[in-house]
Image (cartoon, rainbow, N blue to C red):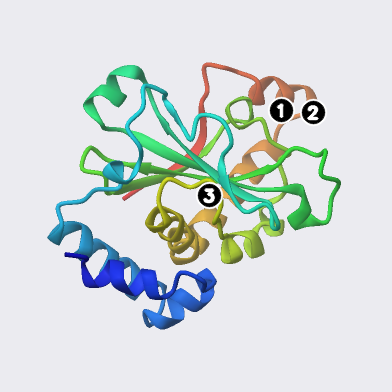
Amino acid sequence: MMHVFEKRLAEYESCSFKAIFAKFGGVQNFLEDCSGYMMQTETSLYSLLPETADLRIPKGKDAGSSDRGYRWFFHFHSRSDQQAITKGHFHLYAGPQHFNDPASMKPTHLIAIELDSDGDLSGLFVPNAWATNEHMRDANLLETALSEFETTDNSPSRILDIWLGAILREFKDEILNLLQKRDVFLAKMSATEQASYLEDRQIDRICEMKF
């Protein structure tokens, strides 16, 4: 039998994320209802991902929104973490079209969202540039992207899509604060020092926040 939460999402299939959150009475209510659904059905965010031997999900084309340039993929930290189904994270990006830039430009990484061993939100972090392969932009240019993030294509789960959109909106201030700390930290370096730091494979995170 379909859970009431699933029924409501099915009814809102054609709605934008903004409209869905409004129908749930706000982003926080959506997240609370989603959490209740997963507890009652013994579902975790991990179980919404397809079973695969790949550390990166989806392996090829990311879940995204072709018209707006948003995209995400999930990544296990290591093969042992994948086998234990623990310590994974989502990478979320905004494409150049969001910023009215040429499509040939690299996307901009917004934030990484980390899960604990139970599949619950455990933290947010800003990866180093070598890991994101991005066109890095100042934090003050990313507020709208965080508020409007929406993906619909090539996704393993619509619940995951909407949950990620909700997390970006609910923790927008915290994410912007992390990105601002990144900018301040990097601005203290010379151009040469900054280039070296951003390509240092021994540094995979610039800053993070744990819950």
Residue 75: image location, x then y, percent: 43, 32
In primary-sequence order, the first of circles 1 and 3 is: 3
Q: Is residue 169 above or below residue 151?
A: below
**Mark 2 residue element:** helix
Q: Which mark is on residue 151? A: none
Q: Secondary structure at mark 3?
A: helix
Q: Amino acid at mark 2?
A: Ala
Q: Residue at x 27, y 43 (%)?
A: 47
Q: Earlier in the sequence, mark 3 or mark 2?
A: 3
Q: Which mark is residue 194?
A: 1
Residue of label 2: 191
* Image quadrant assignment for residue 86: top left
Inter-mark Cα distance, 3 to 2:
21 Å
Amino acid carrying label 3: it is: Leu
* Residue 92 in view: no
In depth, the one of 86 and 193 nearer the eye is: 86
User: How far is mark 1 from mark 3, CA to CA?
Assistant: 18 Å
User: Residue 201 vs residue 156: left or right?
Assistant: right
Q: Is residue 3 left or right of residue 180?
A: left
Query: Is mark 1 in CB contact (under 8 Å) with mark 2?
Result: yes
Tell me if mark 3 has few (under 14), some (14-19) or many (20+) residues whose alpha carbon lies within 10 angstroms of its own: many
3 or 2: mark nearer the eye: 3
Mark 1 to mark 2 CA distance (whole Å)? 5 Å
Residue 114 location in percent, x, y?
38, 42
Crowding near pointer 2: few (<14 within 10 Å), some, many (20+)? few
The circle drawn on residue 178 is: 3
Rendered residue at 65%/20% (across/down) = 199
- Under mark 1, the amino acid is Gln
Residue drawn where x is 50% and y is 78% of the image: 19
Does residue 167 appear left or right of residue 122 in this picture? right
